[in-house]
Amino acid sequence: MTIYGNEPALQLIRTMAASDRLPHAALIYGERGRGRKTIARYFAMAALCKGEQKPCGVCSSCRKVLLDTEEVHPHPDFIWVEHSGKKQGFSVETVRGICKDAIVAPNDGERKVYLFADCDAIDIRAQNTLLKLTEEPPPHVLLLFTAEHRNVFLTTMLSRMMPFAVRPCTAEECRRALTEDHGIAQADAERAAAACGGNIGRSLAWLSDPELRELTAAAADATRAVAERKYYELLRILAQYEKDRFKAAELLRLLDLQVRDAVVLKFGMKDLAGCDRDSAQTLSGVISGGRSRILHEALQAAYEALQANVSTKLVLAALGGNLLS
Ligand SMILES: [Zn+2]
């Protein structure tokens, strides 16, 4: 399994596995599509491996984890905890079931690994039910959590988890992953990697989804309109999404990354996360640090208003004014 980016995290996992010092709970957090679940699988592989250099990638246990996908889980001791409830969190019953199951010895080897993936909607009741297991897990248990942000967890939970922040891949690492692992043509991989800020998961979605490509183009146009202070042009771009709350929110998220990139470019740094370097560059030429913060806050406020079900049309109209005030 080739994993692009995040080598320091993998190195740490290997070192801990080699000295038999893997933690009992870990949180892998960061932006969606950055490889949180891939790192979680690597962690599971290292914990369950029966070979010498863990994870060896060739023993029966490693091979089962390698065959693991979101739908198929061939290793009996690598357990994906099922999401439940309206918000796709974890219900108290589900968590209670896991706490009971965790006491039972492993099926196949020395450990049992539980993966709570995408914990962004995990609620306080579920966490309180999990707390005891996280504080005093049976020696064979490893609990893995993935989430976009750390702050969805109670501090009592956080204090028991070893944190791993997923690092963005460089555009080059992303391009290599797309061509080598996913068989994507060089030119397409380059365009996708650049449009998705080196995010492999998003690049794959971008390549297969024309609507996402249209959104990234709109975000680039909007960035240019803000830089050139073209008020009506900006309103025209935003108004295209006034009937689609979901796409409008995604556009705001992309635009926020563009503003971030403009600042990054201003400081001569290279770690870009947005969808269009050229327009971010144009914006960076005309924007101050204070101004970028105002743009970021306006975008954040609009994003939150969309989540709170304020009329999409109103939110976008107000945003157009706020971005160029
Ligand atoms: Zn192995």
Image (tube, rainbow, N blue to C red):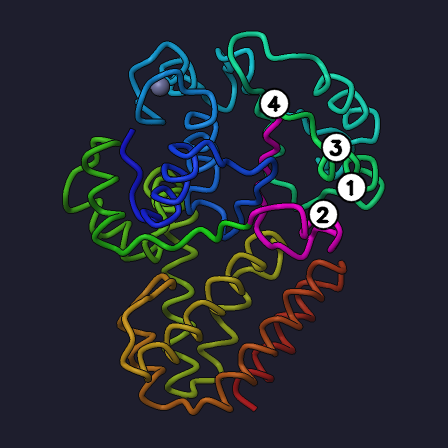
Residue for point 78% across, 40% down: 131
Local secondary structure at mark 2: helix
Q: Which three-letter amino acid code belongs to the residue tagged 1? A: Gln
- The outermost residue toward the front is 19
Residue identifier under label 1: 127
- Disc number lying in front (2 or 1): 2
- Disc number lying in front (1 or 4): 4
Q: Which three-letter amino acid code belongs to the residue tagged 2? A: Met
Q: Which numbered marker is on residue 140? A: 4
Where, quadrant-wise, is the C terminus in this rendering?
bottom right
Q: Residues within 10 Å of mark 3 (few under 14, many from 20)?
A: many
Q: Which three-letter amino acid code belongs to the residue tagged 4? A: His
Residue 150 on the magenta span? yes
- Contact? badges 2 and 1 (CB < 8 Å): yes
Between the C-alphas of marks 3 and 2, the distance is 10 Å
- Contact? badges 2 and 4 (CB < 8 Å): no
Between the C-alphas of marks 4 and 3, the distance is 12 Å
Residue 246: x percent and y percent?
Answer: 60, 52
Residue 321: x percent and y percent?
Answer: 59, 84
Where on the image, by quarter, is ligand 1? top left
Residue 150: x percent and y percent?
Answer: 62, 54
